[in-house]
Amino acid sequence: MPSLKDLKNRIGSVKNTRKITKAMQMVAAAKLRRAQEAAEAARPYADRMSAVIAGLTAAAAGSAAAPRLLAGTGEDRRHLLVVMTSERGLAGGFNSSIVKLARLRLQELQAQGKQVSILTVGKKGREQLKREYGALFVHHVDMSEVKRIGYENARDIADEILARFDAGEFDVATLFFNRFESVISQVPTALQVIPAVVEEGEAAASALYDYEPDEGAILNDLLPRAVATQVFAALLENAASEQGARMTAMDNATRNAGDMIDRLTTEYNRSRQAAITKELIEIISGAEAL
Amino acid sequence: MADTMQFDLVSPERNLLSVAAREVRLPGAEGDLTAMPGHAPAIVNLRPGLVTVVAADGTETEFAVTGGFAEINGESVSLLAERGHPRAEMTQEVFNEMMAQARRRVETAKERESAGEELVAAAVKLLADMEALGTHIGLDPNQANFPH
């Protein structure tokens, strides 16, 4: 049975924790709004980009020399997994769910005898994968210095991936990130970026364009940009998801702390009451003994 | 035929401009071109340079863009640029930063042994185009040599 003083201290410390989680929740809510706006603002560019590429691919499909970024290396042996996580924890299952998905895919690929390498973005995913798969790491991108995600960050990551592709290090690249669905739901997603996956439906409308220079040259110029755009979109979705997950997690933590305080306060009052009762009994029995 | 068309300037981060335009002058990779309403559908690669938008009332607005591409059809022009700045906002400082970025790309392209010559050549070409752009609008590309 803890003493009254212990209980009081305990209540005080849980109250402090609640203050912190409450503050974190509110900060996450504010950041979430900004992250969501950024993700939405980036959408028109990405949409048009994929529409144009769909049109181009349809137009270039006839020509024999399709770029390698589109057609692939003709093999499916070596895979690069780009695991994008956050730099900070305390975001509920945000990082674990990405890592879990990546790990599943990794095991699946290894079971098929494929060669897998990992590129991590954000230190949380790196920490979680390091013990088991540290040997597969090829590169790490540190985002801890980045305050606001800009297109530049995405392009740096994309350049890294593309350089490795040009050097023939892998055949297929897949991004792992959390797609932002709503504040309470973030969906871990695997997106293949190399070779590019083209949505069939959009292709038909734009087949009658003139291309300057020719389709192949534009496609060569556009595909690396498309990779950067996809990385950028993934980074933004991830950022919004992170804040959403943190907000939910901190909301739960705040509520739990509240419950705990209630429970501890009840216990504290009971002990206090018991002590008073005990003292009273002592006094009364003392008086009776006289 | 309508005498204006919809012009959108879109960067990866946000929509920069969306107006009705009478004509748009673009720095195409293979030469400048002007798009007017009723232009044949085309997709054009751009080099870093100035985009001039002539609005419905005849006022001209200039933007500096760092490459990208434009989708032109009879009723609209969509310009997808990695970066775009209104001419008035293109100060030496902004330009220096853009130059520094272009230089950094050349450096990283050269450093990577794996990178093909094409990649390096593309980065060098980009840098040269950027310099030309700066000189054109009266900014000194060489000032950007000194990091600050």
Image (cartoon, rainbow, N blue to C red):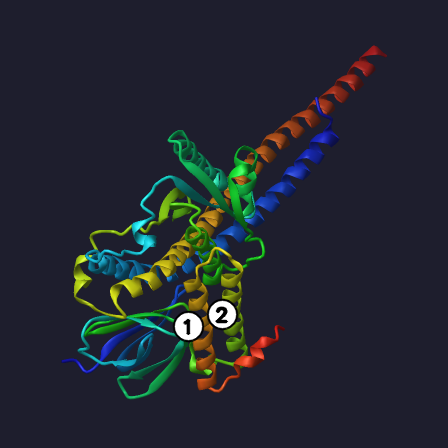
Most foreground residue, B52 or A24: B52
User: On the picture, is A3 further left or further right than B121?
Assistant: right
Q: Secondary structure at mark 1?
A: loop
- Does the image show residue A108? yes
Q: Please provide percent x and percent y for residue A256.
A: 54, 36
Amino acid on which the number 2 mark rests in the picture: Ala
Amino acid on which the number 1 mark rests in the picture: Thr
Q: Earlier in the sequence, mark 2 or mark 1?
A: 1
Determine the residue positioned at 52% across, 70% down: B103
- Does the image show residue A129? no
Q: Secondary structure at mark 2?
A: helix
Disc 2 to disc 1, C-alpha distance: 10 Å
Determine the residue positioned at 55% across, 34% down: A259
Residue with the mark numbered 1: B66
The residue sitting at the top extreme is A289
Most foreground residue, B16 or A287: B16
Residues at discs 2 and 1 in contact (Cβ within 8 Å): yes
**Chain identifier of the residue bearing label 2 in the image:** B
In the image, residue A2 sits, relative to residue A127, either above or below, namely above
The quarter of the rendered structure image containing the C terminus of chain A is top right
The residue sitting at the right extreme is A290
User: On the picture, is A35 further left or further right than A3?
Assistant: left
Q: Please provide percent x and percent y for residue A4.
A: 73, 29
In the image, residue A136 sits, relative to residue A35, either above or below, namely above
Check disc 2: other Cα within 10 Å, few if <14, some if 14-19, many if 20+: many
**Chain identifier of the residue bearing label 1 in the image:** B
Q: Please provide percent x and percent y for residue A107.
A: 43, 32
Most foreground residue, A33 or B68: B68
- The answer to whether tags 2 and 1 share a subunit is yes
Determine the residue positioned at 21% across, 72% down: B73
Residue with the mark numbered 2: B102
User: On the picture, is A51 further left or further right than B114?
Assistant: left
